[in-house]
Image (cartoon, helix red, strand yellow):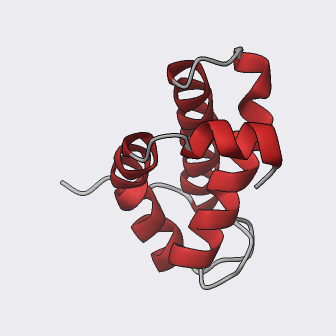
């Protein structure tokens, strides 16, 4: 059986996952979790450019949002694997 998830629910799930990712990546980089906002902003900008055709999370097509959701773990792994990337975002902006 396929469960149907509302547009709003999937968009909120992507946002929540990005916030969680930002906090994890910030702490793993050795910074206080209070710096996660800068990392979240950079992650959101990246996801918009790569998966949402430049649209905001609220205006993107549902298929794009679904694809972004599927790609989030890969994004986290790749960002976390680049030495100094998260620190650079925090120290110098996104």
Say left or right for 46 vs 74: right
Q: Position of residue 81 (x, y in %)?
A: 36, 43
Q: Looking at the image, which is closer to me, 79 or 49?
A: 79
Q: Quadrant of residue 23?
A: top right
Q: Name the residue: 74% across, 71% down.
A: 56
Q: Position of residue 27 (x, y in %)?
A: 58, 19
Q: Is residue 3 above or below residue 59?
A: above
Say left or right for 37 vs 6: right
Q: Is residue 68 above or below residue 28?
A: below
Q: Is residue 67 visible to us here?
A: yes
Q: Is residue 54 above or below residue 56?
A: below
Q: Looking at the image, which is closer to me, 21 or 82?
A: 82
Work out which quarter of the rendered image holds the N terminus and state it: bottom left
Q: Looking at the image, which is closer to me, 63 or 4?
A: 63
Q: Name the residue: 69% across, 54% down.
A: 42
Q: Position of residue 93 (x, y in %)?
A: 81, 50
């Amino acid at each position: 059986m396929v469960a149907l998830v509302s547009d709003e629910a999937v968009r909120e799930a992507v946002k929540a996952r990005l916030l969680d990712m930002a906090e994890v990546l910030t702490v793993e980089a050795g910074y206080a979790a209070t710096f996660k906002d800068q990392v979240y902003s950079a992650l959101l900008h990246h996801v918009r450019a790569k998966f949402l055709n430049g649209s905001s999370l609220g205006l993107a097509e549902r298929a794009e949002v679904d694809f972004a959701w599927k790609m989030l773990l890969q994004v986290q792994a790749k960002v976390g694997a680049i030495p100094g990337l998260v620190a650079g975002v925090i120290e110098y902006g996104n």
